[in-house]
Image (cartoon, rainbow, N blue to C red):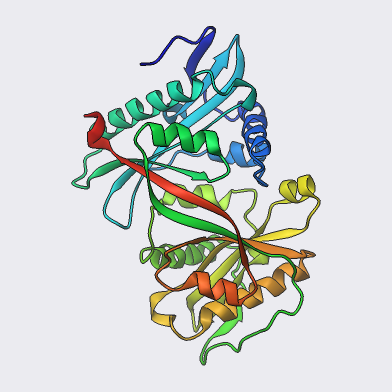
Amino acid sequence: MLTEIPGLSLRAHPGGTAPAELMAPIANAVYAANGIDERTTVAELENWLGHTTVGFDPHQDVVLAEVGGALVAYAWVDWVDTTDGLREFRLGGYVHPDRQGRGIGRRLLAWQEEHSLTHSAATATDRPRVFGTWSSDENVSKVRLFTRAGYEVARYFFEMNRPNLDDIDLPPMPDGLEIRPIAADRASQKQLWDADVEAFADHWGGFDASDAAFEAWLSDPMHAPDLWVAAWEGDEIAGAVTNAIFAAENEAFGRARGWMETVFVRRRWRRRGLGAALVARALVRLREAGMTEAGLGVDSDNPSGALALYQRAGFQVYRRSAAYRKPMEVLR
């Protein structure tokens, strides 16, 4: 049973991107309190709040929690259809560490689940429906909140780091393939997007492949085609690595880390050594951009053997995260 929290009020996101300046410090305080070396920027939040996609409308799906008129927490819901046949309503949010332990997280979770049920009733599908969330193991309070509410681990993921960019072995490119850049024009960017979507269909999870999601991706402040490495066969993209540099995180932690946002090889070109060749060349590209280390995330049960590939390329596991799920029928 939820108890009353003195002074707490929940209100819908007001529209526009203005709340981003108040939201980013809350997320970053949570990261810092849990020893998580991530940071969220105002620009990233503004891009997120500025786009409505198939499964997310910031005007309806974001809630702000205030105490005495001051923002202390926020939460959101979106949904995706997953590759294992589900419709997943994904719940995310942050409560400032100074305000944790007072029931605000439970109140936001109740809002999220109720909002998801309303969403579910309005979106027709034959797929089973689940609630889902994501957390690193370090965020103990979030893990505790969701597990106490009946959420269970569905899948583990690792974050990996290559502590230096020295001694990068360059495997040969498979026959018939060559490295060429991805042009900055819209059609070329869409070609890469579509290739990534196709490759992701063979992996676990959910991915919004809509045109609206593509628009949000194009305007992401971390979008940096000059850092990408793509393999081509003729006019087809066989695979690619989309690198990014999170300058705010590097500044906060006194490092020069590049991040491999996406690593993919399309099915037709797998089992030929292309993944290893792309990863090595992506490391070189990050080194050329002034980075001294590299990071990436990987599904612990990736069906294509990605974990072993990254280990051979010099990456080491340094953090575990998990996807959690709960059947929606539990609340019906």
Tell me: 294 left or right of 289.
left
Tell me where residue 328 sits by quadrant: top left
The location of residue 331, given as percent across then percent down, is 25, 29
Q: Relative to 73, does residue 320 appear above or below in the rendering? A: below
The structure residue drawn at horizontal position 33% and vertical position 53%, both measured from the top left corner, is: 82
Tell me where residue 40 sits by quadrant: top right
Tell me: 266 left or right of 230.
left
Q: Is residue 32 something one can see in this rendering?
A: yes
Count every numbered label the image shows and give the total. Answer: 0
Tell me where residue 55 sits by quadrant: top left
The structure residue drawn at horizontal position 43% and vertical position 30%, both measured from the top left corner, is: 61
In this rendered view, identify the residue nearer to me: 32 or 280.
Answer: 32
In this rendered view, identify the residue nearer to me: 83 or 47.
Answer: 83
The structure residue drawn at horizontal position 35% and vertical position 16%, both measured from the top left corner, is: 1
The location of residue 53, given as percent across then percent down, is 42, 42
Tell me: 309 left or right of 303.
right
Q: Relative to 230, does residue 139 appear above or below in the rendering? A: above
The location of residue 301, given as percent across then percent down, is 42, 64
Seen as rendered, the residue at the extreme left is 126
In this rendered view, identify the residue nearer to me: 60 or 145.
Answer: 145
In this rendered view, identify the residue nearer to me: 11 or 293.
Answer: 293
Q: Relative to 44, does residue 239 appear above or below in the rendering? A: below
